[in-house]
Amino acid sequence: MAIHRWEMTIMELTDGEEKKYQVTRRFPALLVSETKLFWTKKEAKKQFDEWLRAAL
């Protein structure tokens, strides 16, 4: 039996002087993904941690 898990990433995107943070979670077995953009690293980290807790 294969174990399927979410893959999660957090990336910093820079456009000139503006920074945004992208948080993505993917479920490769179902070809499903969800992405959210945030203006602050704190908000992005909060979302990442929320998804991480939900995946356990």
Image (cartoon, rainbow, N blue to C red):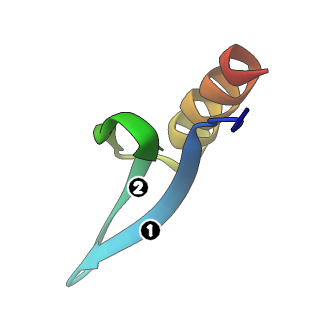
The disc at residue 21 is 2
Decide which of tag 2 and tag 1 comes sooner along the chain.
1
- Indicate the quadrant where residue 19 lies: bottom left
Q: Between residue 8 and residue 47, name the one nearer to us.
A: 8
Image location of residue 31, percent across then percent down: 29, 42
Q: Give the residue displayed 62% in from the left and 35% down from the top.
A: 4
Q: Measured from the top left, where is residue 17 in percent x and y?
A: 27, 79
Helix, strand or loop at label 1? It is strand
Of the pair 31 and 54, the residue shown nearer to us? 31
What is the distance, in whole Å, between disc 2 and disc 1 at their CAs?
5 Å
Q: Are marks 2 and 1 in contact (CB under 8 Å)?
A: yes
Residue 37 in the figure: left or right of residue 41: left
Q: Is residue 30 left or right of residue 29?
A: left
Question: Disc 2 on helix, strand or loop?
Answer: strand
| Side of 41 relative to 26 (left or right) | right
Image quarter (top left, top right, bottom left or bottom right) of the C terminus: top right
